[in-house]
């Protein structure tokens, strides 16, 4: 079991708020949506999840 950062691309409106609040610069954006660029750097702090107005990014439990 563990936790992992997930993005629901169909919900992402590409506002970039999650990118701005990420202290480790794990996230980036392309024409489609936000994506995880440096997953190994992610500390799962949850700031991106907290700030996303569309609930498109979240920390999921891996079972």
Image: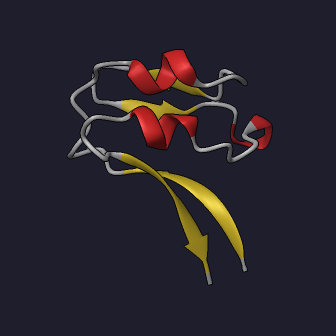
Q: Nearer the viewer, residue 18 or 33?
A: 18
Q: Where is 13 relative to 60, above or below?
A: above
Residue 22 falls left or right of residue 14: right
Residue 61 falls left or right of residue 41: left
Q: Where is 46 relative to 58, above or below?
A: above
> Dividing the picture into quarters, in which one does residue 23 lie?
top right
Q: Given the current orientation, which residue lies at the most extreme front position?
A: 50
Q: Position of residue 34 (x, y in %)?
A: 40, 30
> Residue drawn 69% across and 32% down?
38
Residue 16 falls left or right of residue 27: left
Q: Quadrant of the N terminus?
A: bottom right
Q: Nearer the viewer, residue 23 or 9?
A: 23
Q: Quadrant of the C terminus?
A: bottom right
Q: Position of residue 51 (x, y in %)?
A: 42, 32
Q: How is the image coloured?
A: secondary structure
Q: Position of residue 14 (x, y in %)?
A: 28, 23
Q: Where is 52 relative to 46, above or below?
A: above
> Residue drawn 40% across and 20% down?
17
> Residue drawn 46% across and 40% down?
50
> Residue drawn 58% across and 44% down?
46
> Dividing the picture into quarters, in which one does residue 27 lie?
top right
Q: Position of residue 7 (x, y in %)?
A: 41, 48
Q: Nearer the viewer, residue 41 or 32?
A: 41
Residue 14 falls left or right of residue 50: left
Q: Nearer the viewer, residue 50 or 12?
A: 50
């Amino acid at each position: 079991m563990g936790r992992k950062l997930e993005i629901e691309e169909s919900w992402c409106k590409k506002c970039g708020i999650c990118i701005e609040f990420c202290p480790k610069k794990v996230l980036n954006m392309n024409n489609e949506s936000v994506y995880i660029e440096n997953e190994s750097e992610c500390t799962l702090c949850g700031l991106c999840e907290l700030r996303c107005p569309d609930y498109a990014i979240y920390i999921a439990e891996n079972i």
